[in-house]
Amino acid sequence: MNDSENEITITHRTFGEGGKYIAKLEGQIATGHLEWEPRGEGVRVATHTIVPKEIGGRGVAAHLVKALIADARKHGFKIVPQCWYVAKKFDKNPDWAELRA
């Protein structure tokens, strides 16, 4: 594996009331994503984090969660970690506690 295969680009798209963070790895067709839905003013529920096995084991899910956290800090919203993976990352990062709804 060369370094270019480790390049992960995260984009955010809104879908209806919610949104999706999409991870694209350079040279790969498969993409990972983290979906969220709104819950009242200033709260987003992280509902699903999905990374296909073709791109698994490369930190894709962690990059998706970090993008969500960065946006929460930048835009001032809180997160309900309904997705088990996002909940696990919150548990491992106590400095994110103020972002948990």
Image (cartoon, grey):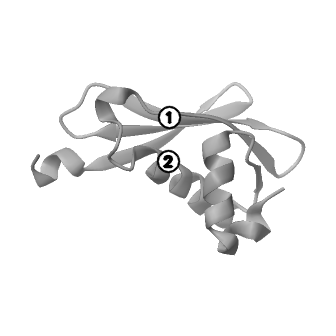
Residue 96 percent across, percent down from the top left? 68, 68
Work out whether 70 lies above or below 84.
Answer: below
Q: Amino acid at mark 2?
A: Leu
Specify the farthest residue to the left.
2
Q: Residue at x 40, y 45 (%)?
A: 60
Q: Which residue is mark 1?
A: 33
Q: Amino acid at mark 1?
A: His
Q: Are marks 2 and 1 in contact (CB under 8 Å)?
A: yes
- Dot 2 falls on a residue whose secondary structure is helix
- Dot 1 falls on a residue whose secondary structure is strand
Residue 47 percent across, percent down from the top left? 69, 34
Residue 16 occupies quadrant: top right
Please name whichever residue, 29 or 76, is drawn nearer the observer in this view of the structure.
29
Work out whether 79 lies above or below 38.
Answer: below
Q: Which residue is mark 2?
A: 64
Q: Residue at x 34, y 43 (%)?
A: 57
Residue 38 percent across, percent down from the top left? 79, 38
Q: Is residue 94 left or right of residue 29?
A: right
> Which badge, 2 or 1, comes first in the chain's sequence?
1
